[in-house]
Image (spheres, rainbow, N blue to C red):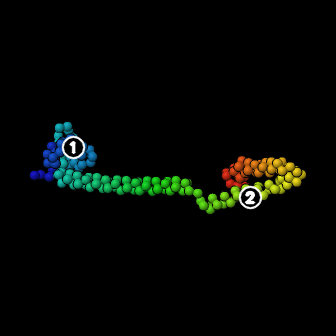
């Protein structure tokens, strides 16, 4: 057997269709002699073609491995991003205890201060009032006003935080 064959001989030798040989040639398979005239066959070196086919197979496997590795990296990146997103969602569900204590302490301070002012606010009116029922109405009105003031603005801040 000779090392140089035409297209039909190469196709028979490799168990392929002549169309496959032409496609491989377009893909870069080496040709010993290209036919200049239609109907004259191209000539191929069997060892060169076999070498080219092996290199192509190795390149395909390498590309596939690279593609798999790239897919693994993308998957890991996506999983990390998802974990970070879930962590942010979890953090959003919980309140910082220190901040919560601070806000509650400020709110209680406002309530305490307003309650402590009730006596001073009504002392003069009660001193001048001999009727117990009227005194009770004055006290009730001042307590209601204090509670209304506290609930109207969440303790003093528009953001729910108490004024200091």
How packed mark 1 is, by other alpha carbons closer than 10 Å (few <14, some 14-19, many 20 or more), is few
Which percent across, then down, holds residue 157?
70, 52
- Which residue is rendered at x = 18% and y = 42% of the image? 18
Seen from the viewer's position, the closer of residues 150 and 17 is: 150
Which percent across, then down, holds residue 153?
71, 49
Which percent across, then down, holds residue 95?
58, 57
Distance from the alpha carbon under mark 1 to that under mark 2 = 91 Å
- Which residue is rendered at x = 37% and y = 53% of the image? 71
Task: State which quarter of the image contains the C terminus.
Answer: bottom right
Q: Which residue is mark 2?
A: 112
* Residue 50, placed above or below residue 35: below
Provide the secondary structure element on which disc 1 rests.
Answer: helix
Which percent across, then down, holds residue 112?
74, 58
Q: Which residue is mark 1?
A: 20
Disc nearer the start of the sequence (1/2): 1
Seen from the viewer's position, the closer of residues 61 and 147 is: 147
- Which residue is rendered at x = 43% and y = 55% of the image? 79
Count of labels shown? Answer: 2
Seen from the viewer's position, the closer of residues 38 and 149 is: 149
Provide the secondary structure element on which disc 2 rests.
Answer: helix
* Residue 79, placed above or below residue 21: below
Seen from the viewer's position, the closer of residues 101 and 116 is: 116
Q: Is residue 22 left or right of residue 72?
A: left
The circle on residue 163 is none
- Which residue is rendered at x = 76% and y = 56% of the image? 115
Q: Is residue 162 left or right of residue 142?
A: left
How packed mark 2 is, by other alpha carbons closer than 10 Å (few <14, some 14-19, many 20 or more), is few
The extreme top residue here reads 38
- Residue 72 location, quadrant: bottom left
* Residue 7, placed above or below residue 98: above
Residue 124 in view, yes or no: no
């Amino acid at each position: 057997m000779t090392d140089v064959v035409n297209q039909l001989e190469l196709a028979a030798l490799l168990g392929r269709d002549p169309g496959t040989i032409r496609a491989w040639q377009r893909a870069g398979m080496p040709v010993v002699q290209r036919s200049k005239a239609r109907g004259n066959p191209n000539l191929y070196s069997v060892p060169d073609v076999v070498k080219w086919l092996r290199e192509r197979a190795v390149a395909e496997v390498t590309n596939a491995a690279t593609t798999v590795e790239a897919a693994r990296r993308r998957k890991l990146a996506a999983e990390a991003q998802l974990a970070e997103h879930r962590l942010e969602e979890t953090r959003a569900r919980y309140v910082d205890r220190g901040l919560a204590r601070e806000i509650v302490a400020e709110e209680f301070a406002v309530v305490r201060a307003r309650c402590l002012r009730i006596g001073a606010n009504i002392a003069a009116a009660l001193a001048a009032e001999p009727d117990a029922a009227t005194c009770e109405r004055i006290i009730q009105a001042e307590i209601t006003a204090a509670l209304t003031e506290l609930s109207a603005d969440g303790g003093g801040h528009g953001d729910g935080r108490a004024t200091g």
